[in-house]
Image: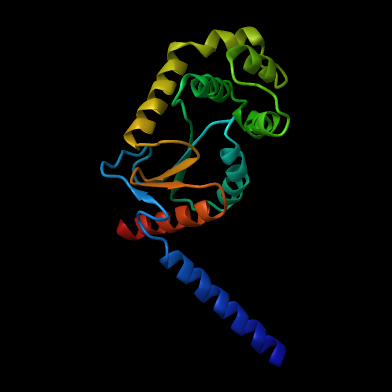
Amino acid sequence: MKKFLVSGIATALFAISASSMAADFVAGKDYKVLANPGTVEVPGKIEVREFFWYGCPHCFILEPHMQTWLKKMPKDVNFVRTPAAMNPVWEQNARGYYVSEALGVRKRTHLPLFHAINEGNQQIFDQASQAKFFVNYGVPEAKFNSMYNSFAITSKVAQAKKLAQQYQLSGVPAVVVNGKYVVQGQDATVTDVVSYLVEKERKAK
């Protein structure tokens, strides 16, 4: 009986602690409030948009936490990945990302590319190296190259640039919640803050 009582108290204290942690998230410290909110892709859903670059070690560290969060993502949330194209090198990877998405291989290549660059020390940053990487996933080099500088891919890259500017991003990783809040960091706290903000937006509806 005593054992169950202690266990129950511990569980209650944990719940109170978790609630207190969520209540402690404050604007200007744990997240940034955007002066000019952006629009969301799917009206009626709470948007969570992750900006990243494959060569960013901080993005690589954050990725497992994002993957865990995605497995329990609420149904009223729309998650969008956006490859940051904030300089010429990053833009090369952004183009590769959108080509992989257009060809339907993005789900199979996203994590392997992260690992190849950050753990395998492979320099997969330009068009040629990316084309060779995607060959391993059934994408012919000619097909990759034909789409790399296409109008459709260029338009998506331009949109990614525009969003990064609109959200006043200075670096990555950055997670934008419902076009209103920016959360930055590389540990599990990021997803805790994101969940807090999602709930905040849900209550505001």
Q: Quadrant of residue 39?
A: top left
* Depicted 148 relative to depicted 11: above or below: above
* Depicted 115 relative to depicted 189: above or below: above
In the rendered structure, the answer to whether residue 203 lies left or right of residue 30 reads left
Please state the horizontal and vertical placement of residue 82, each as a whole percent of the image. 47, 32
Q: Nearer the viewer, residue 117 or 47?
A: 117
Q: Nearer the viewer, residue 203 or 52?
A: 52
Q: Nearer the viewer, residue 164 or 76?
A: 164
Q: Quadrant of residue 101?
A: top right
The residue depicted at 50 percent of the width and 57 percent of the height is 192
The residue depicted at 66 percent of the width and 86 percent of the height is 6
Please state the horizontal and vertical placement of residue 163, each as a whole percent of the image. 37, 32
> Is residue 1 among the parts visible in the rendering?
no
The residue depicted at 62 percent of the width and 26 percent of the height is 105
The type of colouring in the image is rainbow
The residue depicted at 53 percent of the width and 13 percent of the height is 148
In the rendered structure, the answer to whether residue 161 lies left or right of residue 185 reads left
